[in-house]
Structures are given as structure tokens and as C-alpha cells.
């Protein structure tokens, strides 16, 4: 038996490591962690204005930035019992869907699959157009604010056209991805026997009572993992749980099915954006005035890589307590299990497919 530590190049911010017990080239046991220096969002936002918590959350991870901002905004709204206009809720769903398209297409671009890069860039460009239109920027969208969105009007025609123009390309990506995944499955034999949590759409029902946060010195058992890990791990209902596109699409026979699920969600998200924008009144009210007082609230959003949970407590218009549970915090608990019985050489490909980010893990 040999202990090996491998840095996994995931194509996302931060450093992911797999610590593996290997026998005859096969992984017998494994733990996956992040050595990335913590950004400490929960500490960074203390005593700050609630709007700063949104700005900071959007910089936790490049992939789920809009979703993180939306989750924090909705936690603040729930804490203050703010009612958001219906048009703002619909526009937020489209914004989150655009975040999903951009993130998934980028993930496929950086995957080990042989896909059409030009097609993926076309879809990414369309998603950025929607993010810019509804969020005022193609990344870290500043329009997200407690009470709704900071927009004078909703550019519905621009949003609808961007989504519809990318749909044919997205359908091709979906077909190509399914074929490429099937080919790679012939080379990589793997199974997934894991609990899952995920809900199609925008919002999730996950609450703080459903989640247990485990510090690294209590979760990790292998010495090398303990020495590296800067991340906490989250259990759902006490169990290691897979979240993200695979869970939402119920495609969990093989780790590489994550890519198939992402390609399918790209198409569905573009259709959702087009449908939503077609039915929105461009002059509808998308912002409620907010009085910042005291309260506590939580929100859960289906971010691109999985369910993202935020809890926030406000005291006299300042953040008093904050907690963020990211998709990577949850997926870290199952990553080692997914590697078990896998040939050692395939570990990077499988972990990359799971969508873990070192920055997301340490946020």
C-alpha cells in the first residue's frame, strides 16, 4: 500500500488535492481537500453594511458569482421581511440561469472531453450578454441588491434574442457531450453510490437545520489530508451528499455524467431565459425600498455547481453573523468515495468532473 498526494488541476480557482491509498494502481481509500488560503467571507462581512456582503460573496468563486450574490440578497430580504416584486423574482431566475450557462460551458471547455471550443465560446458569449443585460456586468453583477435589481428597465428583447440565438449551438453541444462522455466511460470504469440533493430550477428548500458543518480536523482521517486541508465539509441530513447538475438531473451512474447533466442544463437554462424574457414587462417594477434594521434569515439557491446556502443575521443595519455553505463544501464529503476502486491515473479526470473549486471550498 502506498500513500500518494496529487494536486488536481480543476480549471477553477484554488488548489484541490486528492490524498490516496493506492494498491497495484487502484485507489483503496481517498480524501479530497483544499489547501487554498481561506477568503473568510463570514469574517470579512462582519460589522459591514448588508450590501457589502453581496459584493464580497460574488467574489468567492468565478463560476457561481451571480448565484452567490442572489443567495445573500435573498437571505437579507428574508431577515428584513422584504417582499420583492414578481418581475424582479423572474428576472433573477433568468440571471441565475445565465450564470448556469456560462459556468457549465466554461466547465465543458476545460474538461477532458474533446468538444467544439468555438461552439462553447458562442454559448458563453450569449450567457455574458444576458448577465450584462440583467446584472449590468457579465461577471460580479452589481445590479443584485436587497429588494430586487438595480435596473431602470428590463432589456427583455436583448435577453430573449441572446438566449434564442444560442439555442441551436447549445443543442449541438448537448449531443456532442453525450457522445464524448460515452466514449470516455469506456476507458474509465467507475460507480457512484452516493446520497443526492438537488432541485430543478432556481430556489432550494435546504435550511440550516438540514446541514452539519464539520471542521477539517474532525472530518479528515489521513495525515496528509489533515496537513493540507483548510476547508470545512458539509453533511446534508448527516450524510455525505452529492449536489449539483448530476443530482438535479438524476444522472449519477458515473462521475462523468456530470458533463452530460451540464450540457442538458445549458439547453434548459437558455430556454428558461427566453421564455421568461418573452413574458416580462420591460417597464415592470424590479426594486422594493429596503429599511435596514435587525433580523435573521436564510436562503438557498441552486447555483451552477450545486445548492448554495446562506444564513445572515443583521443588527442595527450591520451584519452580526453570517454563514455560507457552498456546493464544494458539500461535494467534498463524497469526492473521496467517488475515487474509491478507481484506477489511480483517472483520479484527476473524475475530480475535475465533480466541479470542485479550492476557492469555493475555503470561501
Image (tube, rainbow, N blue to C red):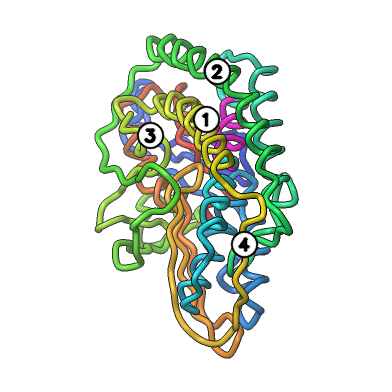
Q: Please give left or right for residue 162 compared with residue 8 in the image.
A: right
Assess whether mark 1 and mark 2 are in contact (beta carbons under 8 angstroms): yes
For the N terminus, which image quadrant? Answer: top left
Q: Which residue is mark 4?
A: 285
Query: Is label 4 or label 2 in front?
Result: 4
Of callouts 1 and 3, the N-terminal one: 3
Residue corresponding to mark 2: 173
Residue shown at the point (61%, 27%) measured from the top left: 164
Say which of 234 and 180 sits in front. 180
Q: Earlier in the sequence, mark 4 or mark 2?
A: 2
Look at the image and say whether residue 340 sits in the magenta stretch.
no
Q: CA distance from mark 2 to mark 3?
A: 17 Å
Residue visible at 38% across and 28% down in the picture: 255
- What is the distance, in whole Å, between disc 4 and disc 2 at their CAs? 36 Å
Q: Could you say where residue 240 lies in the image, as x and y percent from the top left?
A: 30, 49
- Depth check, mark 4 against mark 3: the one in front is 4
Magenta range: 99-108
288 sits left or right of 243 in the view: right
Secondary-structure class at tag 4: loop
Residue lying at 39% horizontally and 25% vertically, measured from the top left:
257
Residue at mark 1: 266
**Above or below for 251 versus 311:** above
Depth check, mark 1 against mark 3: the one in front is 1
Residue hosting label 3: 246
Q: Is the magenta region chiefly helix, strand or loop?
A: helix
Which of the marked residues, 4 or 1, is nearer the chain's N terminus?
A: 1
Location of residue 261 (image quadrant): top left
Of mark 2 and mark 1, the one earlier in the sequence is: 2
CB atoms of marks 1 and 3 within 8 Å: no
Which SS class for mark 1?
helix
Amino acid at each position: 500500500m502506498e500513500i500518494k498526494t496529487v494536486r488536481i488541476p480543476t480549471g477553477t480557482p484554488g488548489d484541490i488535492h486528492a490524498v490516496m491509498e493506492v494498491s497495484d494502481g487502484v485507489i483503496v481509500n481517498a480524501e479530497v481537500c483544499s489547501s487554498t488560503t481561506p477568503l473568510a467571507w463570514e469574517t470579512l462581512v462582519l460589522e459591514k453594511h448588508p450590501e457589502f456582503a453581496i459584493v464580497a460573496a460574488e467574489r468567492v468563486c468565478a463560476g457561481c458569482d451571480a448565484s452567490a450574490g442572489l443567495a445573500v440578497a435573498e437571505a437579507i430580504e428574508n431577515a428584513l421581511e422584504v417582499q420583492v416584486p414578481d418581475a424582479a423574482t423572474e428576472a433573477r431566475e433568468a440571471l441565475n440561469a445565465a450564470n448556469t450557462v456560462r459556468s457549465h460551458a466554461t466547465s465543458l471547455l476545460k474538461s477532458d472531453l474533446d468538444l467544439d471550443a468555438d461552439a462553447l465560446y458562442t454559448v458563453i458569449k450569449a450567457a455574458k450578454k444576458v448577465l450584462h443585460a440583467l446584472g449590468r456586468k457579465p461577471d460580479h453583477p452589481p445590479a443584485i441588491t436587497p429588494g430586487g435589481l438595480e435596473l431602470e428597465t428590463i432589456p427583455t428583447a436583448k435577453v430573449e434574442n441572446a438566449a434564442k440565438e444560442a439555442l441551436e449551438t447549445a443543442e449541438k453541444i448537448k449531443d456532442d457531450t453525450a457522445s464524448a462522455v460515452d466514449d470516455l466511460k469506456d476507458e474509465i470504469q467507475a460507480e457512484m453510490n452516493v446520497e443526492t440533493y438537488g432541485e430543478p430550477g432556481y430556489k432550494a428548500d435546504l435550511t440550516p437545520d438540514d446541514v452539519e458543518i464539520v471542521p477539517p480536523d474532525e472530518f479528515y482521517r489521513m495525515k496528509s489530508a489533515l496537513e493540507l486541508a483548510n476547508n470545512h465539509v458539509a453533511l446534508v441530513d448527516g450524510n455525505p451528499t452529492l449536489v449539483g447538475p448530476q443530482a438535479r438531473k438524476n444522472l449519477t451512474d458515473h462521475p462523468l455524467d456530470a458533463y452530460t447533466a451540464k450540457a442538458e442544463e445549458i439547453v434548459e437554462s437558455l430556454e428558461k431565459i427566453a421564455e421568461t424574457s418573452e413574458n416580462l414587462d420591460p417597464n415592470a417594477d424590479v426594486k422594493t425600498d429596503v429599511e435596514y434594521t435587525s433580523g435573521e434569515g436564510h436562503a438557498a439557491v441552486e447555483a451552477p455547481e450545486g445548492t448554495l446556502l446562506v444564513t445572515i443575521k443583521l443588527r442595527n443595519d450591520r451584519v452580526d453573523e453570517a454563514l455560507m455553505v457552498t456546493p464544494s463544501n458539500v461535494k467534498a464529503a463524497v469526492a473521496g468515495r467517488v475515487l474509491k476502486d478507481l484506477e489511480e491515473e483517472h483520479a484527476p479526470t473524475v475530480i475535475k468532473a465533480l466541479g470542485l473549486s479550492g476557492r469555493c471550498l475555503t470561501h
